[in-house]
Image (cartoon, rainbow, N blue to C red):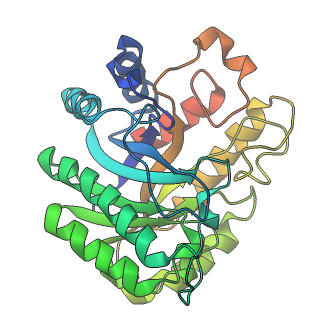
Amino acid sequence: MEYIKGFTFGWGAKRGDFSKAEAKESLKLLKERTASEYVIFALAATQETAFSTEVIYDGEHMVTDHELEEMIDYARSLDLKIMIKPTVNPADGIWRAHINFFDIDVPCEPKWRDWFRSYTDYQLHYAKIAAKKNAEMFIVGCEMVQTERKEQEWRQLIREVRQAYKGLITYNTDKYQEANVSWWDEVDVISSSGYYPLGDWDNQLDRIEEIIKPFNKPFFFAEAGCPSRTGSANVPNDWSMDGEINFEEQRAFYQDMFAKTAKRDWVLGFGLWDWKALLYPESEADKDGDYAVYGKPAENVIKNFYLSN
């Protein structure tokens, strides 16, 4: 597998957003400003709660299939390669890692089989689009920590996706959870979220290498990033922490992550988090403390690293 110089695009985009001229301009800027070669289209389906069994992927909270396909076509015109990442979160704000059900069926309680049936339908819907548009990779899930113990259900889901889509398939486990997935042999590529503290990358890379080595599969970080807030470099996964806007924190995180992973030839790239479909004005970058890098020093760090790899 080639080295992936990627960025996640469009997370949280709603119906109509991809049709706006600003979204295409944003994607163009992503390519120009970061030297990315891959764009990951992350889709944000919902389910009512962490204990609901219906995944809702048709509604105002999602871009339409036509919008997505048009944006993929535009990405191709920019010479970008494509990954599609259908993701789900409970609508009540609980993180998807907490989606969970009883392992033994109980009458009148929600069941794993019903959730996996709905989630598989969701994945297959976008796997067909991935096939139609010849996407280079399909990401069948992201940080679904409590679901990962359901090995047979995940294996069956991936096999069904393969019937619809013939390209590379990965699953994006969460930070620290690389050993939690017993079914890495079922995917083509192993990936996880690289939200590791500044100064701890060597420890974490040593740990991950030992876990994935027996599977003999390519590996990349399908997510990685850091908010531009004081303290965020120490807990880059905490998107809600308070802190003053601090570009140096974000820049230092990227410098450290790239320096340490560059020494490991088994780390084959990144799908950085994240680049919005609708950007803030560059002149207002100093008001943004989120993961965005547009107009911030980290943007140049990323571009220089991607250009040198």
Q: Position of residue 238 (x, y in %)?
A: 74, 50
Q: Position of residue 275 (x, y in %)?
A: 50, 33
Question: What residue sits 38% from the left and 86% below the top?
Answer: 152
- Residue 88: x and y in percent read 49, 53
Q: Residue furthest front?
A: 108
Name the residue nearer the viewer: 106 or 79: 106
Horizontally, residue 74 falls left or right of residue 116, namely: left
User: In this image, 46 relative to 135: left or right?
Assistant: right
Q: Quadrant of residue 52?
A: bottom right
Q: Is residue 1 above or below residue 154?
A: above
In this view of the protein, can residue 157 be seen by the observer? yes
Residue 23's place in the image compared with 131, above or below, is above
The residue shown at (44%, 55%) is 55
Examine the rendered structure and indicate whether residue 175 appears above or below residue 60: below
Viewer-nearest residue: 96 or 286: 96
Residue 295 sits in quarter = top right
In the rendered image, the vertical position of residue 240 relative to residue 193, given as above or below: above
- Report whether residue 135 is seen: no
User: In the drawing, does residue 14 fall left or right of residue 204?
Assistant: left
Q: Pick whichever, 308 or 167, lies toward us.
A: 167
Q: Quadrant of the N terminus?
A: bottom left
Q: Nearer the viewer, residue 32 or 153?
A: 153
Q: Could you tell me how many numbered marks the image carries?
A: 0
Q: At which x and y percent is residue 252? A: 71, 43
